[in-house]
Amino acid sequence: MERLTKYALRGLGLLFILFLLLYAGDYLSVRIRLRHPTRDDPLESMTRTRVLAIPQKNGRVDFEVDAQKPVETVTCVHSLFPHMGYPACWRIKPHFNDPIPMQILAPVLLRNPQHGLARVS
């Protein structure tokens, strides 16, 4: 049993070290590509029209352009992991133009000892 625990801990340590090496290599790759700009630039900016998917009481969904922020620009990094505060492009691109689902929340009812139920807005 003690031997099995020892091997399991070594295996986990090895996996952790491999993960750190992979992350460091990915980060260095992004940094090198940033220093030497070519057509293989690691950063990409994408622009989209924000469309809201608003559910209706009858079960249908209305699609409307967001009135407060109709256009959005997102910058992502071409790498395996997110770096420098930018998400990885492979993670964003498949659903980038999907409508943003909205939820209609019922007003919260709180118990007020003096007045019974009160609506919070």
Image: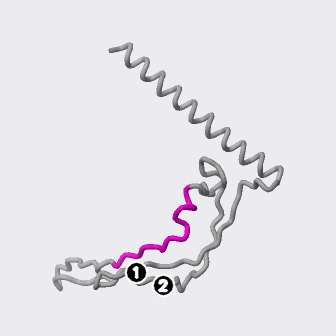
Instruction: Please state which amino acid type lies under the numbered disc 1.
Output: Ile
Instruction: Please state which amino acid type lies under the numbered disc 2.
Output: Glu
Q: Are marks 2 and 1 in contact (CB under 8 Å)?
A: yes
Magenta-colored stretch includes residue 94: yes
Provide residue 23's location: percent of width, then percent of height: 62, 40
Position of residue 120 in the picture relative to residue 97 (left or right): left
Which disc number belongs to residue 54?
Answer: 1
Q: Earlier in the sequence, mark 2 or mark 1?
A: 1
> Against 18, is 114 above or below?
below
Q: Quadrant of the C terminus?
A: bottom left
Provide residue 113's location: percent of width, then percent of height: 17, 79
Q: Quadrant of the N terminus?
A: top left
Identify the coloring. one colour
Secondary structure at numbered mark 2: strand
| Crowd band around label 2 with a 10 angstrom C-alpha radius: few (<14), some (14–19), many (20+) | some
In front: 100, or 118?
100
In front: 26, or 119?
26
Q: Residue, x 57% and y 62% (percent of image)?
A: 93
Q: Residue, x 74% and y 47% (percent of image)?
A: 31
All told, the count of numbered labels is: 2
Provide residue 54's location: percent of width, then percent of height: 40, 81
Magenta-colored stretch includes residue 95: yes
Q: Residue, x 41% and y 84% (percent of image)?
A: 62
> Against 6, is 67 above or below?
below
Position of residue 10 in the picture relative to residue 87 (left or right): left
Which disc number belongs to residue 64?
Answer: 2
